[in-house]
């Protein structure tokens, strides 16, 4: 899947890093193989020899217990190894993994198979990041090229917003069962949830445009203090990727620039914008517990990466809870922190999630660039509140 996402690219596209928080495609390709090399092949196969020992430093993302690393904002400076050499590196690690899967003794395999599963989920996370980073890189190019030609959006009209009530109660949230989950989704625990209502669908572009045209970006009373300061500093007056010319509002997509589709969910807003919009609309953002309780009986379905639409689709459902998964991640008002009794993984992989539990907000659901099998009800995504380049939208609560 990761490599198939690179099929529309030219070599030059692989190298661009358009901002400090994003990474070049070639870095994603190398780093996801680095993960298997570092956490499976090195501890599990004594005969494994790296293709280049310096890659340990170059493609380490943030694992200080593994060793020092190249600084993230300078990943775009790495023209060598070449894209061709990085594909050769992937082949080398893949061959090592095939040997491991064939030859590992039962004890070693039992020890490392959870790490392989983690490595595959890690690849899925980077598939999504690869596309969000490419979208930003193409956006920063004044020619605003298309990643690939996208299918025309189905003709759609905005379905009226419907509020779904939920009763109060002591509810359980967190990962349950034998399937894979990241450490931050556990342990499952009880929470008290007061009565609440959840919007049945995501906020649409048309609804958000009313906020923009109604002066939402010029009224500090709607904004959190940090949000207003960020809005001023960053000069925000609409979501990332929105454009306006004489013909009206447009948006940049992975298929290039096209007229804004009013019925589709608004996307690429920061937490601050989502929060200000909710206040303007007389509502608020859900907590992550409310979101998960509401999603308990909902199917994990929607428009995922496999649909290759690369943008969120309009809601068609009129009353039932919809767009929980697939279209766009949803900001919650919950700060990203540890569940009671949380235990990070042991060793270097303890750095995967736990150390990021400050200064970030939880996002729930999944987006149109999330692989289908990566989505689940207990999933806790997290980003700093000013970030806008991920596919993130807004679901209202009250
Ligand atoms: Fe990573």
Image: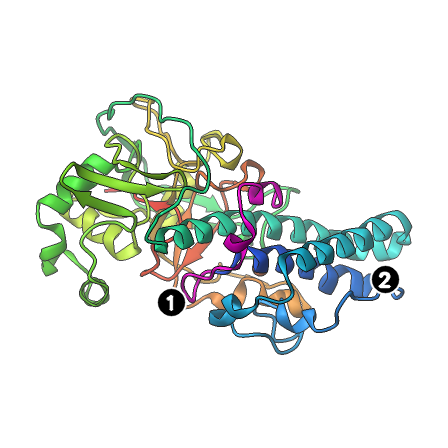
What label sits on residue 45 in the rendered view? 2
* Residue 358 is a magenta residue: no
State the residue in front, 303 or 276. Answer: 303
Q: Nearer the viewer, mark 1 or mark 2?
A: 2
Q: Quadrant of the C terminus?
A: top left
Residue 207 appears in the figure = yes
Q: Quadrant of residue 39?
A: bottom right
Residue drawn at 86 percent across, 62 percent down: 45
Looking at the picture, does residue 153 appear above or below residue 270? above
Q: Nearer the viewer, residue 259 or 114?
A: 259
The residue indicated by pointer 1 is: 359
**Is the residue under label 2 in contact with that under label 1 (CB below 8 Å)?**
no
Residue furthest bottom as drawn: 68
Which color scheme does this rendered protein use?
rainbow
Q: Main secondary structure of the magenta part?
A: loop
Q: Quadrant of the N terminus?
A: top right
Q: Disc 1 or 2, which lies upstream in sequence?
A: 2
- Horizontal side of 339 relative to 54 (left or right) equals left
Count of all numbered marks drawn on residues in the image: 2
Q: Nearer the viewer, residue 107 or 27?
A: 27
Tag 2: Cα neighbours inside 10 Å, few (<14), some, or many (≥20)? some
State the residue in front, 167 or 246.
Answer: 246
Number of the label disc, if any, that sits on residue 262: none
The residue at 79%/52% (across/down) is 97
Label 1 sits on a secondary structure element that is loop
Please check the rendered image and state whether residue 16 is part of the magenta-colored stretch, yes or no.
yes
Q: If the picture is divided into quarters, which one holds ligand 1?
A: bottom right
Secondary structure beneath disc 2?
loop
Question: Residue 122, image x and y in percent?
Answer: 60, 53
What x and y, as percent, mark residue 386?
31, 61
Query: Which segment did they paint magenta?
Result: 1-22
């Amino acid at each position: 899947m990761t490599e198939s996402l690179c099929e529309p690219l030219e070599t030059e596209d692989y190298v661009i890093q358009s901002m400090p928080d994003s990474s070049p495609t070639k870095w994603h390709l190398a780093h996801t193989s680095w993960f298997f090399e570092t956490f499976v092949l090195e501890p599990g196969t004594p005969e494994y020899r790296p293709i280049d020992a310096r890659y340990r430093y170059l493609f380490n993302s943030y694992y200080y217990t593994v060793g020092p690393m190249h600084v993230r904002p300078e990943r775009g400076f790495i023209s060598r190894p070449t894209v061709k050499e990085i594909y050769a590196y992937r082949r080398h690690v893949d061959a090592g993994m095939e040997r491991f899967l064939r030859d590992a003794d039962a004890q070693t395999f039992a020890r490392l198979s959870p790490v392989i599963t983690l490595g595959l989920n890690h690849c899925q996370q980077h598939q999504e990041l690869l596309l969000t980073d490419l979208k930003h890189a193409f956006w920063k190019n004044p020619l605003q090229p298309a990643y690939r030609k996208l299918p025309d959006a189905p003709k759609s009209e905005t379905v009226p917003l419907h509020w779904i009530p939920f009763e109060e109660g002591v509810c359980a949230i967190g990962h349950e069962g034998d399937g894979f989950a990241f450490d931050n989704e556990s342990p499952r625990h009880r929470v008290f949830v007061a009565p609440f209502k959840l919007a049945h669908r995501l906020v649409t572009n048309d609804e958000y445009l009313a906020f923009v045209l109604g002066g939402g970006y010029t009224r500090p009373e709607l904004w959190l203090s940090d949000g207003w300061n960020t809005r001023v500093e960053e000069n925000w007056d609409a979501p990332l990727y929105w454009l306006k010319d004489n013909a009206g509002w447009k948006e940049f997509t992975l298929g290039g620039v096209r007229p804004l589709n009013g019925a589709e969910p608004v996307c690429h807003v920061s937490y601050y914008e989502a929060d200000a919009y909710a206040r303007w609309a007389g509502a608020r953002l859900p907590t992550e517990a409310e979101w998960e309780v509401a999603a308990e009986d909902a199917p994990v379905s929607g428009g995922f990466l496999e649909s290759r639409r690369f943008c969120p689709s309009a809601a068609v459902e009129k009353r039932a809870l919809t767009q929980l998964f697939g279209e766009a991640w949803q900001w919650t008002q919950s700060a990203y922190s540890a569940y009671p009794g949380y235990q990070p993984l042991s060793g270097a992989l303890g750095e995967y999630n736990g150390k990021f539990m400050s200064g970030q907000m939880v996002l729930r659901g999944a987006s149109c660039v999330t692989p289908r099998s990566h989505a689940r009800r207990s999933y806790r995504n997290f980003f700093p509140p000013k970030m806008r380049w991920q596919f993130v939208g807004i679901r209202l609560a009250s």
